[in-house]
Amino acid sequence: MKLSELVRYLNYLDQDTLPASLAETLNQSQKLLSSIVEQPGAFPSYNFDLESDFSKIQDSVAQFLGTVDSVKQQVRDLIAEREFELYSQSQHLYEDEMIYETAEYILNRKLSISDQQIHEIEATVLRRTDWRWPGLIFRPGKEKFIESLVPLDPLYIVDQSMDLLQPAISKFEPAYQRRLRPYVIDDREPGNILGKLPDNQFGFVFANAFFNFKPLDLIYRYLDELYNKIRPGGFLLFTYNECDLWQGVDIAERSFMCYTPGHRIRSHAEALGFVVEKNVTDPANAAWFEFSKPGELDSIRGGQSLAKIMPKPVAESK
């Protein structure tokens, strides 16, 4: 049995429908029992037997649910034993293939994400942007998200080559291009990945379709460093491949993304001190986390020159 099949079975067992259905059955049975024993002419001698039988039903249901919980734990234990193979596969996939992908391939790669999900992410981004503190976006690519981040001042844009950054830079007029802070990073070697970026400065950090293609241990390294880069009260929002759902495991088994269970990302982030503000998981869409760093966002800036930043107009084809 593949790991994705085990996780699919666990996802089914974790559904709320089973306990809810049984609870509704017990509730209806309780109403029926009450109706029977309260009827005029009911036999008191039989009421005791009816109530005793109903109590046995309750005990049986509780025992059944306890057995289901035991089965779920056994499946979780089996997943924990089997998942190391996928961790290793993801690490080799990254080291042997992903780091050699061309800029063109990376820039044209898209996540499966609905318009509604995009609007939800954009709304969250807009709530977190403010000219009073710097912002950071990983892999801005060709997506429109960067246009919602321009109030952040300055805006750092980060990726693994200038070829990957250039499409985002070219979206804007030269005057705003000069305000962007492009940085090229290399996460293939030990040591600090973000060492050139300032500490405790960023009010908001955003990464779409970046951590989906990083192995779990490398995501841990990024989170370790980002906790020190984000100022108290700041936020971090990123998409990832949710391998607590069988669909994410299947994607990892087919070597399209890395194996990154959300519960492990959450545990590592919380151990660092991050607070989980939101976790969106939808089998049909990209999954994403929003973390915050405890504290209050503040700034010593007194004001900013107001001007609307517009993307560079696209030339009309003749």
Image (tube, rainbow, N blue to C red):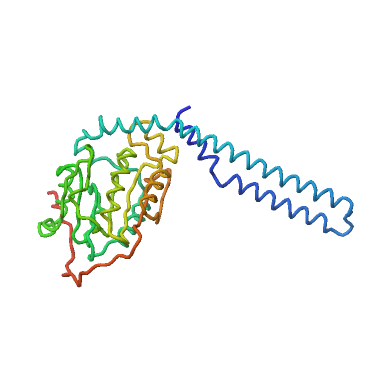
- Of 261 and 248, nearer the camera is 261
Q: Whole-percent x and y of residue 117?
A: 37, 52
| Placement of 89 over or under 37, stated as above or below | above
Q: Looking at the picture, how far across and down is residue 311, in whole percent? A: 17, 57
Q: Is residue 8 above or below residue 267?
A: above
Residue at 30% from the left image edge and 61% from the top image edge? 232
Relative side of 2 to 66, left or right:
left
296 or 136, nearer to the observer: 296
Q: Is residue 13 visible?
A: yes
- What residue lies at 45% left-to-right and 33% top-to-bottom? 4
Write the residue at 20% across / 41% down.
186
Provide residue 270's location: percent of width, then percent of height: 39, 51
Q: Is residue 94 placed above or below 164 in the rendered structure?
A: above
Residue 172 x/y as whole percent: 15, 55
Question: Horizontal placement of 97 versus 2: left or right?
Answer: left
Q: Quadrant of residue 84?
A: top left
- Residue found at the far bottom of this picture: 302
* Quarter of the rendering containing residue 62: top right
Task: State the count of labels.
Answer: 0
